[in-house]
Amino acid sequence: MKRRVIASMLAAMMAVALTACGGQAAAPAPAEPAPAPAAEEPKAEEPKAEEPAPAPAAEEKTEEAAPAADAGELIRVGIINNDPNESGYRTANDADMKKMFCEENGYEAQFAYSLKNDEQIAAAQNFIQDEVDYLLLSAADTAGWDSVLQDAQAAGVKVILFDRTIDAPEDLYEASIVSDMAKEGQTAVDWLASQGLDEYNVIHLQGVMGSAAQQGRSGALDEKVAAEDNWNIVNQQTAEWNAEKAQQIVQSVIDSGDKFNVIYAENDDMAKGAVAALDAAGISHGVDKDVIVMGFDCNKWALEELLAGNWNYDGQCNPFQASYIDEIIKNGTPAEKVIIMDEKGFDAKTITQEDVDTYGI
């Protein structure tokens, strides 16, 4: 594929950064961009014991990998992700991508970040115009991607989805390495049902609306509430993955005097914000306390809250997709285009220090 000078990117609609191994991304598209923390910070820490299972072996491929670049040249990838400061999960995910897609591993990588679908689509168009070999995408929203993926296909740019699914025909992308968000939600709701409460009065803190994570984690709870008379939603509102917004929402419910006994937060940061509001109001939470606290992502600090009995449940969301993508790029499209990350849920009554050390991100 022909190469264009990197200077053409200065005229693009979104700022992107040419990043070498461990390098720093340039200012992302959102209004208040910030790069991911350094790898040694706790939130970016990878699990110590369990790594993602290797991608399918080369003999399972449906087709041979076409060389993305001439011999000796770097494979050019454009990586579109959500803001690295969105959550501890996203920090770990971004660090994993940067560690893999670097010159030492045969890549020339450019990164673009946004929590807005239209800005991500603009970045994708810029990468296509810049003639990257691969477009790697973690979409902010599931909808609206058909046209840009068709443009990529027409330009010979191969698309690989990671972290989140989109609503687009499978023939528009090479592979999808994602979490089963609906399963994450169902596992969490099944655990909550097993607690045997007489009545479930839930504050539901949702993530960014329209994202695959929000849809999957909300769906199971919505279905359960609709099916059971003793399940009630006290407040259902997006806090956009943000701890401060979550704290404000929970504080408003406390101030209203509405009774609740469950916090169902769709990520750890929002659960943390909810707990801050509970603490300020002197409301007990955790194991055998007044309010059940649930989160998702398995940040190490969140699992430590479970271990201490301050939270009750945390659902895993595995952020380490880069090795799978590298395998696909270098060895060809797998027989199964959709690869689901292996994940589980953790209960405060059974979690161990080994679990915290192994699965905490």
Image: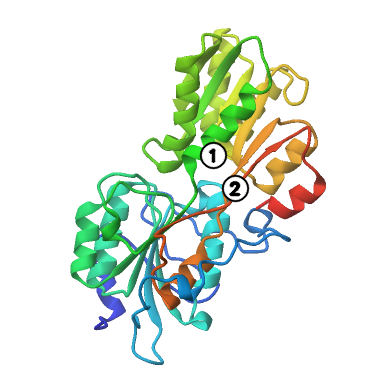
Q: Position of residue 351 (x, y in %)?
A: 77, 40
- Label 2 Cα crowd, 10 Å radius (few <14 / some 14-19 / many 20+): some
Dot 1 amino acid type = Glu
Determine whether, in the image, residue 331 is placed left or right of residue 135. Answer: right
Determine whether, in the image, residue 236 is placed left or right of residue 344. Answer: left
Q: Is residue 39 above or below residue 241?
A: below
- Label 1 Cα crowd, 10 Å radius (few <14 / some 14-19 / many 20+): many
Q: Position of residue 253 (x, y in %)?
A: 55, 15
Comparing 28 with 146, the one in front is: 146
Instruction: Say if mark 2 contacts mark 1, CB within 8 Å.
Output: yes
Q: Is residue 171 above or below residue 274?
A: below
Comparing 287 with 123, the one in front is: 287
Q: Quadrant of the N terminus?
A: bottom left
The mark found on residue 343 in the picture is: 2
The residue lying at 68 percent from left, 17 percent from top is 196
The residue lying at 47 percent from left, 38 percent from top is 182
Q: Secondary structure at mark 2?
A: loop
The residue lying at 74 percent from left, 37 percent from top is 305
The residue lying at 54 percent from left, 25 percent from top is 248
Q: Position of residue 163 (x, y in %)?
A: 46, 53
Spatial CA span between label 2 and label 1: 8 Å
Q: Position of residue 6 (x, y in %)?
A: 31, 78
Between discs 2 and 1, the one toward the N terminus: 1
Q: Secondary structure at mark 1?
A: helix
The quadrant holding residue 267 is top right
- Residue 98 seen by the camera: yes
The residue that mark 1 highlights is 184
